[in-house]
Image (cartoon, grey):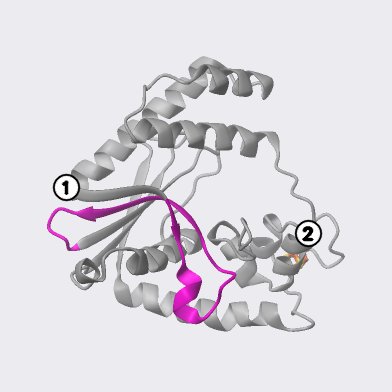
Amino acid sequence: MSDHARIPPSYLKTALACAMAVIWNETVEDRSGRAAMIGTVLHDEFERVALGGDPSLTPNAVIELDVLDCGQARAQTLLDRAIVALRALEERYQIGERWHEVRVDPGAAIGRSDFWGTSDYIGISGDGSTLVVGDAKFGKIKIDPRLNEQLLAYASGALRFIDQGVAVGIETIAIAIIQPTAPGIGLVVWETDRQMVADFLEHCRERLALTDLDEPPVEPSATACQWCKGRYECPSRAI
Ligand code: SF4
């Protein structure tokens, strides 16, 4: 099995908006920019500390960030803030059981083997009524958890990942964005329910089927093209 999904949840918003973007994602070389590379380093550090590691940046992380021209003090502040936000999230829902960096498979519910990914955080409230799905973001563009395609996909995968005896008691789905660059404590949560997740999956089923066509439709829009992997090559791009 490939290490990479054809349609990862992180690319889902783009894939749903324009099926052709999935074809570009398969064919164009990844061009991660400096901000994305900094985010990857901080993301790894966040996971390490969240799992009980030393709260200080590791020497390797400091070197990697220095190469990317990201100051140690700034990076440490972002890491500290992200951990504070995570603890606030866990306190809010009195988390009883948690997982970090787990593979979830939303595609399995709609018959797709190419739609899966890794969720930063999955938690279940102590009373068993709430599934919490969290994602850490280190970029400057503020991310909204409401109707967030990536996290709804993780939530649908998480509902399959957790023990099914526990899953039947879940009533609320809490979608959380941990973003230490944002104002306040850098935590925004949107609560929804299982029906929303089920409806969203049906939407995915219909739209992602377009990516299987011999000639997938090209549907330019600001939403689709902003993060499309093929935006530098595609002659139809909107922006
Ligand atoms: S650049 Fe825009 S129109 Fe072209 S494939 Fe990507 S999302 Fe679709």
Please tell me which residue is depicted at 55% across the width and 39% down the height of the picture. 139
Q: Please, what is the three-letter code of the amino acid marked with disc 1? A: Gln
Residue 161: give its label: none
Q: Is residue 205 above or below residue 89?
A: below
Q: Nearer the viewer, residue 52 or 148?
A: 52
Q: Position of residue 27 (x, y in %)?
A: 79, 61
Q: Position of residue 3 (x, y in %)?
A: 61, 56
Q: Is residue 54 left or right of residue 211?
A: left
Q: Position of residue 168 (x, y in %)?
A: 21, 73
Instruction: Indicate the quadrant of ligand 1 in the picture.
Output: bottom right
Please tell me which residue is depicted at 24% across the width and 65% down the height of the picture. 172
Q: Range of the magenta residues?
A: 102-129
In which quadrant will I find the N terminus? Answer: bottom right
Which element carries disc 2, helix, strand or loop?
loop
Q: Is residue 159 magenta?
A: no
Return the residue at label 1.
94
Q: Is residue 167 left or right of residue 229?
A: left
Labelled pair 1, 2 in contact (Cβ < 8 Å): no
Q: Is residue 134 above or below residue 164?
A: above
Mark 1 or mark 2, which has the lower sequence index?
1
Q: Is mark 1 within 8 Å of ligand 1?
A: no
Return the residue at label 2.
230
